[in-house]
Image (cartoon, helix red, strand yellow):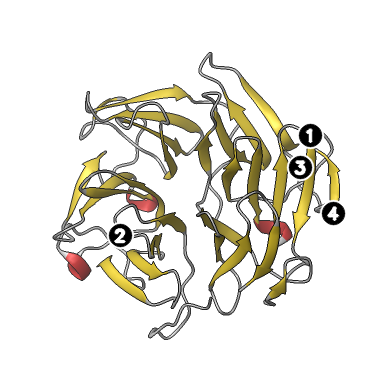
Amino acid sequence: MTTPSIYPRPLYFSALELSEQHPDLLVAGQENAIVTIHKVTGAIEILAGEPYLQGYVEGVGRAARFNYISGIAQLKYKYILSDVENHCLRSMDYLSNETQTFAGLCGSPGRADGSLLLAGFDFPQGMTRDLGSLDVIYLIDYRALRKIDLSAETVVTLSGSSNWLPFPSSLYRTGITMNAAGGLLITSWHGVIQYKFNETIQWVTGNTKTGAACAECDISSASFSSPSDLRLITPEVLLVADTGNHKLRLVNLTSGIVTAIGAGQGYQNGPYQDSKLDSPMSMAVDSSFIYIGEFNNAMHSVRKLAYTGRCHFLSFQ
């Protein structure tokens, strides 16, 4: 689907999630605003912020200002948003659309652990909820992995001051998700790493060097180019937005095979083997479709990839 725009230039979607409140909607970061997108019509409604106006203002609805939204977590009554260049986390109430500082000192970068409003953040990006505890959020923050405990209202650094995560890119998008085994899968440099809670970190696929996307290859030899997001379709199958290669990559964690989806850079719908993408950077997945936000495409669209729910892909729409 192509999302209609009333703005002088198209806007890309820096974060994308399924709405837990409304099954027909997606929740998206649209540069400096939080919006909803209708899954069928593509209609956009701005909830808070203004896509073209960056800054730091707490307020109601479009009076609020953000400086690049890169991650979204959904709580019972609010969205938690990573506000990258304001160096903090913000919240937005579902009912009133009022924003507040949720964690960090907005405008003051740092790395201090501690209570929510006294902790420091550098460039907070992707977030994911703990599968075993809804009170825990994991966050990528510059070159560190942070844990946010909602019940204790604290921020703790799990791993940091290392080279396993790249410096923030111009996209400011690092994907993170939790697998059933209890580890965290994270896009890093030009591949995917896994963080285990015994504090071990290992490459799942790819490495620190950029490379072209193979049509099909072994997980140990696959190359990526600045992947931005990732989602588990099943416990054993990982989908990666391979941004620099303009493709999606299907990583089978059981068979060890990596498969490319898409025919290269461009804008073309149709059968998935022949369709073209341009810098896919954010994704959301439901039982019938994979929703993909693109960065460079002139349409700056959200595309839908139909599938059967067991990784049998059909076509882009």
> Are discs 4 and 1 less than 8 Å apart at CB?
no
Disc 3 or 2, which lies upstream in sequence?
2
Callout 1 amino acid: Ser
| Residue drawn at 39 percent across, 58 percent down | 68
Disc 4 or 1, which lies upstream in sequence?
4
**Mark 3 or 4, closer to the camera:** 4
**Mark 3 or 1, closer to the camera:** 1
- x, y percent for residue 210: 76, 47
Mark 3 lies on a secondary structure that is: loop
Callout 4 amino acid: Ala
**Nearer the observer, 162 or 50:** 50
| Residue drawn at 86 percent across, 44 percent down | 217
In the rendered image, which residue does mark 3 sit on? 209
In the rendered image, which residue does mark 2 sit on? 66
Callout 2 amino acid: Phe
Callout 3 amino acid: Lys
Label 1 and label 2: CA atoms lie apart by 42 Å
In the rendered image, which residue does mark 4 sit on? 215
**Mark 1 or 2, closer to the camera:** 1
Label 3 and label 2: CA atoms lie apart by 33 Å
Disc 4 or 2, which lies upstream in sequence?
2
In the rendered image, which residue does mark 1 sit on? 255
Disc 3 or 1, which lies upstream in sequence?
3
Q: Is residue 293 left or right of residue 63?
A: right
Disc 3 or 4, which lies upstream in sequence?
3
Q: Is residue 2 left or right of residue 104?
A: right
Mark 2 lies on a secondary structure that is: loop
Quadrant in the picture for the C terminus: bottom right
Mark 1 lies on a secondary structure that is: loop
Label 4 and label 1: CA atoms lie apart by 16 Å
